[in-house]
Every structure is written in structure tokens, then in C-alpha cells.
Amino acid sequence: MLKLYNTLSRSKEDFIPIIPGKVSMYSCGPTVYNYQHIGNFRTFFFEDILYRVLRYNGYKVKYVMNITDVGHLVSDQDEGEDKMEKSAKLLGRSVWELAEFYTGVFYRDRDLLNILPPDVYTKATDYIKEQIEMVKCLDDKGFTYKTSDGIYFDTSLLKDYGKLARLDIEGLQEGARIEFSAEKKNITDFALWKFSPENEKRQMEWESPWGKGFPGWHIECSAMSKAVLGNHFDIHCGGIDHVPIHHTNEIAQSEACNGEKFVNYWLHGEFLDMGNEKMSKSSGKFVTLQTLIDRGYSPMDYRYFLLTAHYKKKQKFSFDALDSAKNGYNNLKSRILAMKISSDGIRDATAQQREDLKKSFIEKINDDLNMPEAMSVIWETVKDSSLNSAEKLELIYDFDKVTGLGLEKLEKDSDNAEVPDEIIKLAESRAEAKAKKDFKTADEIRVKVREMGYEISDSKDGFDIKKL
């Protein structure tokens, strides 16, 4: 049974889809006003793992991700400029050109990280009609009011507003600063539709029943998910930063308009910890995937790094940690390549042993996507001396449907083959000798490998090989 941590209940729950065998899933995608940084991709990676685990469990998944190309203001409090319009002015490009360029870069980086594309991408500017219709729905039901700069949602009219974040509304009201917008009835109220500034023409603006303007960021996801998945669906996910405002407001407006529960399971990925330097696209201080590539890392080195931490825990990033992940991934590749050229015969493994490894892997991934533990099963499989190479590869390729490291596609004559086949075979033989406590043979092999210009060192994953 697949278990997922539901932010709404603050507990790990059995996953039971609305329709047996089928899953409807929505995630908040990129705002395409700049490059996505590696912290953004930690979230997209976690959603990719969720998608892969659901499919591995045999579910037919309809996965939708939005692309925000309008309406995301520089402040989550409905203040400041639209991020897209601001960036376009700075770069001297049209908003439409900007959106197309950064969407393309996002797709490229997604593919480099072997993140599976969703079944449907919804671009905010393609769903303006649906967003206006949802605002009209809320307006007709009496949940809105008008200010000088837009149409707002009155959160005081929804008794359970803030249930996802478990907000202390009274505490928030008491802490409100005097300079807070006098036109807002409540500090938690949020914009559904923003009016275009007077005497200024925006590049992205549309006519509406309330005047020319553009949608608020929150209404976009509610309208697009409803258009593709319906009023009520299984899973909504995103970064942990979306809990207190964006996802809280999505729930409020969707349930107020539709009159029914919005989403059953809410999943949120934790931050990538960059130490004292917080990554921010707005400030220009961030590390992109291309930054890593320029420093000699492969995208799969970063994917391997992400697999070493649980999505609900902060993961501390450093180049030393990435070096360690790179070594681990190179070691794994070397072992896979050695298995591919191996002609070892039948071992003592039984069908039960292979089933036990697969069962263990499934238990780990189904325990709220516990990828560090799942990776330990992969290494256990690699080092299992009772399995022959063909048996190991069959299991590892199956597991890689979830891990997404591209292990089946490795070629011995590719850039991945950093260590000669002969050295890898000797290292494998040494590992087997050590497992049998034949330390004399193990030492002899180590000396021979050293004479050939390579050093074998033991590691938690078995061994590392370095050229002297």
C-alpha cells in the first residue's frame, strides 16, 4: 500500500484514489520570467519521483503542471509589479518573447535531468476565459469585493480558511502593520483580478466584467486544474513555500466556487539549503543547472545527489556534497558497465532472493517516496554475490524506472566509461574475495590494480576506483 504524507492532515496516509486505478495530479510549475535554479528543480524532481512511483504501482496517471506567464507579482501580498512585466522591461524584450525563451530553457533542463514531462502543461495565458469565469462564480456567490486596484476574495466569509497552513488568523490580524492596505477588509484577503494601472499599458492585459486587467496568481491554478482535472482531484503538490499563501488561497477560492472538496492529498517538497545564501531569481543570486554543467558536473550527478535525501527534509547543498554524489554515481555506472560485459554464470540465487529485493524496493518507495532507502536497495542488489550480472541488471533496470538515472542506456564506449573494463572486473573480483574473507587474494588484486595505474578504495557503496 502506497503511503503519502498529506500536509492537510499532517500525517502519513494510505493513498486511495477517487477512481480505482486512476490518479489525477496537479503541480505548480515554473514562473517563466528567469532561469529556474537548482532549488526549483529539487521540487520538480520530487514531483517526478511521485509521478514515477504512481506509475510503477500500476496507476494510470493524468499529470498536469502549470506554467505561469502572467499574474505572479513580486510580492505574495498582491503588491508590486508582475514578475514577467518587470523582467521584460529590464531585458528590453516583450513579455511573450521572455515567456517563450524561459519556458524553452525549462524544458531543456527538465530533459537533461531526466524529469518526465507531465501529460498536460497548462499555460496561464491560455486559460484567461476560465479564470474570469471562476472570478464571476465567486462574485455571484458573494465572496468578493472591489478596491481601487482589483477584485479581492473576502477570506472572512470562509469558516475554514487557512486550514492547510493552520493559520492563526486572529494573530495575523493583531500583527498587521498600520501601513497595511486600508482597502483590504482582512489581512489574508487576496486578489482575484488586478486592474491595469491607470495611464500605463501592460503587455499582458485583458477585458473583463470589472475592467481591463490581468488575473491574480492564485486564481490561475484553481481555474486551470478545474478545466483539466475537474472540481475534485487526487493530488496537488509543490514547494513548501506554497503552503501558507498560494495553496491556502487555491483551496479557499476553489471550494467557495465549486461547493465541494478541492484536493484529497497535498504534498510539499522542502527547500534546498544553500547555507547563508538564499537563492532568489528576483535578486539574481542563484545557481542554475547550467552553472553545475559549466563546473564539470553532469545533470545526472545532481539527480543522484537529490536521490540521497527525503523530499520532506531540507537538503544542504555544497560542492563537496555534489562531489560525493558524483563519485557515488560514477561508481554505480562503473559497476553497471562491468555487469554489462560480464559473462559470469549461474550463481546460487533463488527466485525468492530476487523477489525479496524487489519487495524491499517497493516498500521503500511506497513509504512516502523514501528514495535514500530505495537507493540502499539498489546498492544491496549491486553487491549481492548470490546474483549473477544478468539478474542484477534486470532488477536495477526495473528500479531505475523510479530513480531515473538512465542506467539501462549506459554504453561502455561512452563518456561514462571512465575506468577500463579490465580494472572494473578486477575490482569486482576483489570485492567478491573480501566478501568470502579471502583477504590475501583481495590484497593481491589491489596491488595488481595499483601497478596498472589505478587505486581501489573501499566505500559505503562497495568501492571507488581512481586513476593514479
Image (tube, helix red, strand yellow):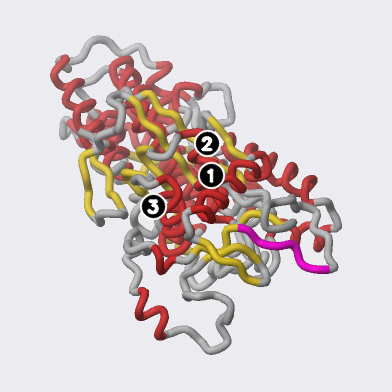
Callout 3: SS: strand
Q: Mark 3 points at which residue?
A: 268
Instruction: Determine crowd level at label 3: few under 14, some 14-19, many 20+ residues with C-alpha closer than 10 A.
Output: many
The foreground one among 374 and 386 is 374
Report which quarter residue 258 is drawn in.
top left
Residue 267 rendering spot, x and y as whole percentages: 36, 49
Q: Point out the tag, 3 or 2, that comes first from the N-terminus.
A: 2
The foreground one among 24 and 298 is 24
Residue drawn at x 75%, y 53% as measured from the top left? 205
Instruction: Determine crowd level at label 2: few under 14, some 14-19, many 20+ residues with C-alpha closer than 10 A.
Output: some
Residue drawn at x 46%, y 24% as measured from the top left? 421
- Residue range of the region highlighted in magenta in the rendering: 193-198
Callout 2: SS: helix
Task: Give the side of residue 192 with respect to residue 304, left or right.
Answer: right
Q: Name the residue under label 1.
A: 223
Residue drawn at x 83%, y 65% as measured from the top left? 200
Residue 172 rendering spot, x and y as whole percentages: 40, 78
Task: Give the side of residue 2 with respect to residue 61, left or right.
Answer: left
Answer whether labels 1 and 2 touch (C-beta < 8 Å): yes
Q: Residue 227 carries which label?
A: 2
- In space, the residues marked 1 and 2 are separated at their CA atoms by 6 Å
Residue 147 rendering spot, x and y as whole percentages: 62, 71
